[in-house]
Amino acid sequence: MFLYMFAFMITSVVEQNFFLYKSCRVNRNFTEEICRNLNKPENEKFRKEAMLTNAWFLQWENISAHVFPIILALFLGSFSDRRGRKLPLLMGLVGKFVYSTMIVVNARMPTWPVQNIIYSATLPSALTGADVAIFASCFAYISDISTLEQRTIRVTILDVIYLSAMPLGVALGSHLYYNVFNQSYADMFTVNASLLALAIIYTLCALKWQTTPRQRSLRELGYCGFWGDFFDKQHVKDSLAVLVKPRKGHRRSFLVILLVSMALYTFQRDEGQYLYMYTLDKFDWDVSAYSHFKTFKSSAYVIAMLLAVPLMNKLLGWRDTTIVFIGTWAHSIARLFFYFASNTDLLYAGAVVCSLGPIVGPMIRAMTSKIVPTSERGKVFALLSVCDNAVPFISGVCYSQLYRATQSTNYGGNVFILTIATQIAVFVMILCIHIVLGKNSLAVPEVPEKESGLISQKEAVVEGETEKHEN
C-alpha cells in the first residue's frame, strides 16, 4: 500500500497539471508559453478556457475509470473469499502500472488531445479492477489476519501506512519535477510506473495466497477453469445476498447505512482536482505552491491519524460512531475555511482542521467488518468498493457541472458547499446507527455462511482472547 500510494502521490499534482496542460496546449491550441504559465495574471482569459475544457475531461475520465471496476467488484468479493486476496490485489496493481505506462506514452505524443488519456490509459487500467481491487483486497487481507479486538486499530494502521506516503510523495514529486526532470511529465510517470513494479514484485513474493482456512488454492482450477470460476454468476448472487440476508439486531439496516455512508463520504475525493484549479485561479498558484500546500495538508492527515485514532479508540474508549462524527465535522468546517479564504493562511488553517477528516474511512470499514463473519468479509469489502467507485458516476458529474456553472462565482468555490452537504449526510446516517445501537456491540461471531448471529461485548472480548491464545 505504501509503494502504491507513494507512486500515486509523486505524480498527483503533476498529473492534475498535465491534464490542464493537455487541455490548453492541444484541445485549445494555445501556445507553449501560455500553457506552461497559466498561473500568471496576464493569462487569466486562457486559463479559464482551459479549465472549462479540463472540467469536461475530468467528468468523463472519472466515469470511464469506474465503469468496469464496479462490475468486477461483484465478482471479486466472492472470488477472493473462496480463492484468497492476493490475485485480485495483483490484478489491481498491474492495472495501475498499465495506466502509468500509458500516461508516459501520452506525454511523449505532443499532438494527442487530453481525451486520448481515457482511451489509452484509463479504460485499460479499469479492466483490471484498479483501485477497487487494491483497496478491497488490502482491507480484506488485513481483516483476515487480525483478531476482533485488533481490527479497528490495524485497519487504521493500514490507512496510516498509505497516508504516510502522501506528504513524502508530494514533496518528492515537486522536487523531481522542477529540479531533476526539468518539468517532464513523461519522466515523472516513469518513476510512478517503477514504484508500481516494485509493489507488484513485493506482493508476489511476500503475501500469502490464502489467509483463512476456507480459501482454496488457485492451482486446482487450471487456466481454463479460472475464468469460469472467476466469472461465476454465483459470485454476483453471493455478493448481493449479503445485502438482503436477515441479520439480528438491525444489522442488515446498519450494513446498508454503512455502504451508503461510504459512498457519501468518498464524494469529497472528486473535489481535489477542483481545489487545485480553485487555488490556481484565485491565488495564482503553480505546481510548486500547490505541492507545498498538499504536502502540509497530507502531513497533518498522517499526524492526526497516528495520534487521534489510538487516543480516541484505545485510551479514551470512544466508539467508532463517535469518531466518525468528529471526522465528518472536520471535513465540513475545513470547507468553510476554503470557501471563505481571502488569503493563503486561511487555506492552511482549513488543512489543519481537515486533518481529522480521513478517520471516517477506516472507521466505516472497521464497523462494516464487525457486522459480518469472516465468510462474508470479502463480499462486503467488495460492496464497499462498489459504493466507493460508483460515486464518480454522480460526484464527477456534480462537481464538473457545478464548477463550470459557477466558475465566475468565487472562482468555482461552490464545490465546497457540495462537499459539506455530503459530509453532513454521513453524520446524520451514522447518528442513526449510534442511537439505535445504544450500548450494544456491533460484533458478530464467526458463523457458517448460511447463518447469522449477534454477540455481546463480553462474548466479543472472550472470542478475541481465544484467538490471541491460538495465535
Image: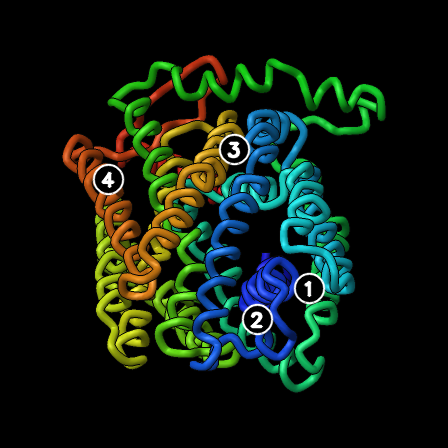
User: What amino acid type should be assigned to the residue bearing mark 2?
Assistant: Gly
SS state under label 1:
helix
Measuring 63% from the left and 73% from the top, which residue is drawn there?
31
Q: Which mark is residue 382?
A: 3
| Marks 3 & 1, CB-CB < 8 Å contact | no
Query: Could you tell which of marks 3 and 2 lies nearer the N-terminus?
Result: 2
Using the rendered image of the protein, determine whether residue 423 is visible from the camera's viewpoint.
Answer: yes
Work out which quarter of the rendered image holds the N terminus and state it. bottom right
**Which mark's residue is nearer the viewer, 3 or 2?**
2
Q: Which mark is residue 430?
A: 4
In front of the other: 174 or 405: 405
In front of the other: 438 or 97: 97
**Which mark's residue is nearer the viewer, 1 or 4?**
1
Q: Position of residue 192 (x, y in %)?
A: 69, 64
Query: Could you tell which of marks 3 and 1 lies nearer the N-terminus?
Result: 1
State the CA–CA distance, disc 1 to disc 4.
37 Å
Measuring 58% from the left and 46% from the top, which residue is drawn there?
131
Q: Position of residue 168 (x, y in %)?
A: 54, 74
Using the rendered image of the protein, determine whether residue 310 is visible from the camera's viewpoint.
Answer: no
Other-residue count near label 1 (Cα within 10 Å), few / some / many at <14 / 14–19 / ≥20: many
Other-residue count near label 4 (Cα within 10 Å), few / some / many at <14 / 14–19 / ≥20: many
Query: Could you tell which of marks 2 and 4 lies nearer the N-terminus?
Result: 2
In the image as oriented, which residue stretches furthest toward the bottom? 179
In front of the other: 314 or 408: 408
Question: Which residue matches tag 2?
Answer: 169
Question: Which residue matches tag 1?
Answer: 192
State the CA–CA distance, disc 3 to disc 1.
26 Å
User: What amino acid type should be assigned to the residue bearing mark 3?
Assistant: Ala
Q: Position of residue 106 (x, y in %)?
A: 73, 58
Query: Could you tell which of marks 4 and 3 lies nearer the N-terminus?
Result: 3
State the CA–CA distance, disc 3 to disc 2.
27 Å
| Marks 4 & 3, CB-CB < 8 Å contact | no
